[in-house]
Amino acid sequence: MFVRKFTLRNFRSWDAVALEPGPGITLFLGPNGHGKTNLLESLGYLATLSSHRVSTDAPLIRAGATAAQIGAVVVNDSRELAIDLEINDGRANRARMNGSPLRRPREILGVLRGVLFAPEDLSLVRGDPGDRRRFLDELLGSRIPRMAAVRADYDKVLRQRSALLKTAGGALRRGARSSDGASALATLDVWDGHLAAHGAELLAARMRLVAELGPHVAESYARIAPESRPASIAYRSSLGASMPPELTDPGRQWTRDDVELLEASFLNELAQARPKEIDRGVCLVGPHRDDLELRLGDQPAKGFASHGESWSFALSMRLGAFSLLRSDGTDPVLMLDDVFAELDRKRRRALAEVAVDAEQVLITAAVAEDVPEELEATRFAVEAVDRPDGRTSTLR
């Protein structure tokens, strides 16, 4: 897979740009703050519908504009698909495929498969569980695009159920038999069922993903840091004792019956947690409370890994994702955002070995010397120009 052409308009520092990178390695060189990362961020957004730098869309729109546009022509096994995304300020984003409007932007997921490694990825090891959940869900969306809809449905039910818990809790604390409180308690069972149904499907998909991803991450880490302890990943569910032990077997072949078993376990855990949930007004059970456990030997990586080990683990997560996507039959686009300067010679070499063999690689760097010599690339210079309407990035 490769991006034959991509265009930007009013995206971050870019007023307008059109580029045809093609297969092979493309290097964007320029000083920090001049806009080179924005190029990779835009393609990463097309691949995952999220930014690796910010959690909201507003910063992606150029100052003074009301919308940003990203377009790409993606070639996969000699087949071309054109996708276009409009990111709007204050209203829903819009997407098109081959010129035809789509009902929802998430319908473009899976067209462009990409793996983006950036300095922010250190949060995969040192950050909060939300960073690791996001990593899993983005990878899921690339491999199984419909899982983005499952996650959206789950989040919608989660918001509704959380509101009901707050209403019920408030009524009980007042000691009043208000209609709002009684109604909330009466409908919680219904929302428990919806949450368990969507949550079990998402949970099963995540657990299958971790089982498949684990060997790729372990192999990547062993190659990058052979002198270190072995790396492993495991899914940690908030279902606790309600989780059927047979479902934790990494080699298990999942069936629909397993998902239904998870759903029943989910409902059981919700029933046990309800008093605490009503008291606190939040949902305490579900995929939104889960974590991806990273371990080095018999210790958790977070809090015990050195700086070098943390970088190695973060890199292994991305290389593992690349290897897993490749095992599906198509090379994803590999994007490396200013990371060679952060890595020592050994890690640079390990990353370069993967890049040399990938169908398309897009790299940003502040200076050419940061990029390993074996990566022969087509080079573009990125410069920022100050104009009356603000700083604008240019390409030459």
Image (spheres, rainbow, N blue to C red):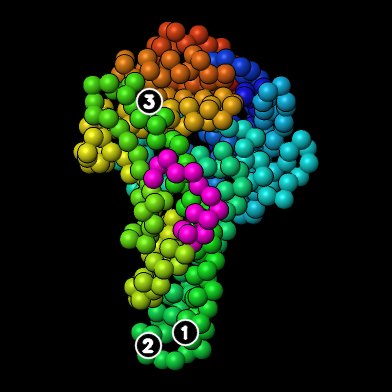
- Number of the label disc, if any, that sits on residue 160: none
Q: Earlier in the sequence, mark 2 or mark 1?
A: 2
Residue type at mark 3: give it.
Ser
**Mark 1 sits on what residue?**
181
- Number of the label disc, if any, that sits on residue 174: 2
Label 2 – label 1 distance at C-alpha: 10 Å
> Is residue 192 visible in the rendered structure shown here?
yes
Q: Up-down: is 199 above or below 124?
A: below
> In front: 394, or 262?
262
Which residue corresponds to the image point at 61% horizontal and 47% vertical from the top-left? 146
Q: Is residue 102 magenta?
A: no
Percent of width and height locating residue 75: 68, 25
- Mark 2: secondary structure: helix
Magenta region, residue range: 249-263
Q: Up-down: is 64 above or below 159?
A: above
- Number of the label disc, if any, that sits on residue 220: 3
Percent of width and height locating residue 306: 22, 32
> Is residue 151 visible in the rendered structure shown here?
no
Is disc 2 in contact with disc 1, using a CB cutoff of under 8 Å? yes
> In front: 137, or 263?
263
**Horizontal side, residue 192 vs residue 222: left or right:** right
Q: Up-down: is 41 above or below 279?
A: above
The mark total stands at: 3
> In front: 344, or 314?
314
Label 1 – label 3 distance at C-alpha: 53 Å
Residue type at mark 1: give it.
Gly
Percent of width and height locating residue 381: 53, 16
Q: Up-down: is 290 above or below 162?
A: above
Which callout, 2 or 3, points to the residue nearer the camera? Answer: 3
Q: Earlier in the sequence, mark 1 or mark 3?
A: 1
- Mark 3: secondary structure: helix
